[in-house]
Amino acid sequence: MTGPVFISTLSEEQRAVYGGDGPLAGLTFAIKDNIDLAGLPTTAADPRNTEPAAESAFVVERLVEAGAVPVGKTNLDQYATGLVGTRTPYGACTSVYSDTHVSGGSSSGSAVAVARGLADFALGTDTAGSGRVPAAFNGLVGVKPSRGLVSTRGVVPACRTLDCVTVMARSVALARRVFDVMHAYDDRDPLARRLTQVALPVGPPVIGVPQGDLGLDAGHDLAWKQAVEHAHELGAVVPVDVTPLLEAAELLYSGPWLAERWLAFGDRMDDDPAVDPTVRDIVRRGAALTAADAFAGFGRLAELARATEPLWSRLDALLLPVTPTHPTLAEVAADPVGVNARLGRFTNMANLLDLCAVAVPGPPRADGLPFGVQLLAPAGHDLALLDLAATWCGEPAAAGEGREADDVMLAVAGAHLSGQPLNGELLRRGATLAHTTRTAPDYRMFLVDGPLPRPGLTRVRGGTSPGEGVEVEVWRLPATQLAGFTATVLPPLALGPLELADGSSVLGFVCTADGADPARDITGFGGWRAWLASRS
C-alpha cells in the first residue's frame, strides 16, 4: 500500500502558537519523525513509541525561534535504517514523479512533503544518504552538513557518531536560509564541533568527476553525461579516481558502524510485528560484532581516508551521482537489501570520511524521472558548496535573504598579523580574525624584499618544515573587499591557494620563485613573530 506523508500533524490551533518575527517568518516546515517536537510522539516509524516529547530538538527550537511554523512529523524508514522509504509499518511513500517508484529514504516523507507543497522546507537526517537520496528522487535540494555542525540533540540516533540533520527545499536559496539558522554550536551535544567555514577560491571552481564506468542504469547514465557537460560550463573538470571513496562506502554496513546501530536501538528489534523485518535482520547483525572487528574497521577507514587526501588538494568539489538508479517499489520488494545497498554506493562514505555534501537536481532522465547529483567537499566547506550548488542551479551565490556575499578566508603570515604594521589594511576592510593555525608541513618561509620586513611562503613538495608548518592567522575578509586588498600586495608576494595543517585550503600570501632565496630561509623559526623576537 502507499503510505502517508505524515505520521502526525499539528492542528491549526497547535500551529497558531508558533510563528512571529525572524529570518524564517512565514515559512512552514515538516519534521522527520525521528526528531523531537515538543508535545508530539517521536515514533521513528515504530508505532509502539507513543510518549510525547518533553522538549523539541535543538535544531527545531532554532527554526521555531526564527519564525518557522512546524506542520507535522513525517514518515520514514524505521529507525532511519534504509535508503528506499519502504521500511515503514505506515506504508511506503512514492516519488512525486511516479506512483510506482520509491521516494527514497530514510527521510521519505520529508522529501514528499516539500515536493508536494505541503511544507516550504523539511528536516531529515542523513547518516548514509538519507537526506540526499529522497531529495534526488523528488527533484529537491538536499543539504547534508559537516558532522557536528548542526546539533543532533533531540534526534533518535541511528549511528550516533555519523548522524547529521539535513534540510530539503525546492531551491538552494531557501535551503541556505534554513541552514544559516540551523547551524549553531550546542554545548549540550557532546558531538558538536566548531568549524571554520572555507570559501571557494577566486576564479572558476575545479570540479572532480570520477573516471571510468560508474555502473549507472541507462536512464541515469545519459543524464549523468549531460550533468558532466554542465560541470564543464561552470569550471575546470578534472577526472579523478574515486575507488577509495567507494570502498569506504562499503564499510558502513559491513564494519563496526552496524554495531553502533545495534547499540542505539537494538533492544527494540524483537519479533513484534511493528518492527520492520528487514530493519530487524540488518540491525541484529550488529550484535555479533566484536571489539576486534571495530578496531579493524576503524583502521581500514583510516587507510582509505588517507588515500582520499590528494583529491582535496586538487579539487574545490567532487561531483557524483546521488544514486546509480531509481528503483520501483516492486524491485525493492524483490531484493530489499541488495537494492538498498546499491542506492548507497555514492552516499554512504560522506560521513565516514568527514565530508559535507549538497544534492541538487541534475538533468531529468529521458523517461521523466528525476536525476540528482551531489557536490562533496571536506568538512567546513558547507558554505562554499552551497555557493557552487547555487551556481549549478542558476541561482545567485549567497542568495539567502539579507545575506551579504560570502567572506573570503585569508591566511596571513607576516606584516598583516594582529598587531603588525599592515594589519590595518585588513581591519579597514571589515576583516575579522577567524582563528590561528599552521600551514601544511611542506611550506618554507623566506624573508623577502619590500618597504618593510615581510615573509613569503613557498610550498616544497616532499619537504617537511621544522615545527610542522608555519604559524598563520586566518582572517574572514568580505568578498567585496578582496580586489582592493589584492591591489596592495607587492611582488614577489601574491595571493594564491594555501593549504592549512587540517588539509583545508584558503587564500594566502605565497612567494613567487624569484623571491624564494635559500639564503633567506627563516622556516626554522616556525613563524614570523618568532623571527621578529629573535631579531630583538
Image (cartoon, rainbow, N blue to C red):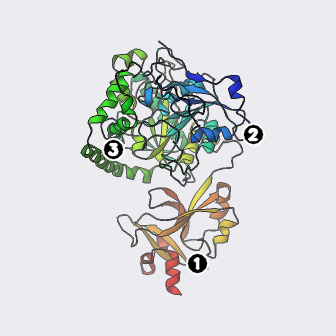
Foreground disc of the pair 2, 1: 2
- Displayed quadrant of residue 176: top right
Task: Kindly give the residue lying farthest to the right in the view shown.
Answer: 21
Residue at mark 2? 21
Q: How many marks?
A: 3
Residue at mark 3? 244
Q: Are marks 1 and 3 in contact (CB under 8 Å)?
A: no
**Residue in the picture at 40% in, 68% down:** 468
Q: What amino acid does circle 3 point to?
A: Pro
User: In the displayed structure, would residue 188 be above or below residue 324?
Assistant: below
Residue at mark 1? 450
**Residue in the picture at 50% in, 19% down:** 93
**Residue in the picture at 33% in, 50% down:** 302
| Residue 114 falls left or right of residue 48 | right
Classify 10 Å Cα crowding around label 2: few (below 14), some (14-19), many (20 and above).
Answer: few
**Residue 48 visible in image:** yes
Classify 10 Å Cα crowding around label 3: few (below 14), some (14-19), many (20 and above).
Answer: some
C-alpha distance separating marks 2 and 3: 47 Å
C-alpha distance separating marks 2 and 1: 53 Å
C-alpha distance separating marks 1 and 3: 46 Å
Q: What amino acid does circle 1 point to?
A: Gly
Whichever of labels 2 and 3 marks the residue nearer the N terminus, that label is 2
Q: What amino acid does circle 2 point to?
A: Asp
- Judging from the image, what secondary structure is the residue with disc 2 in? loop
Q: Quadrant of the C terminus?
A: bottom right
**Residue 143 visible in image:** no
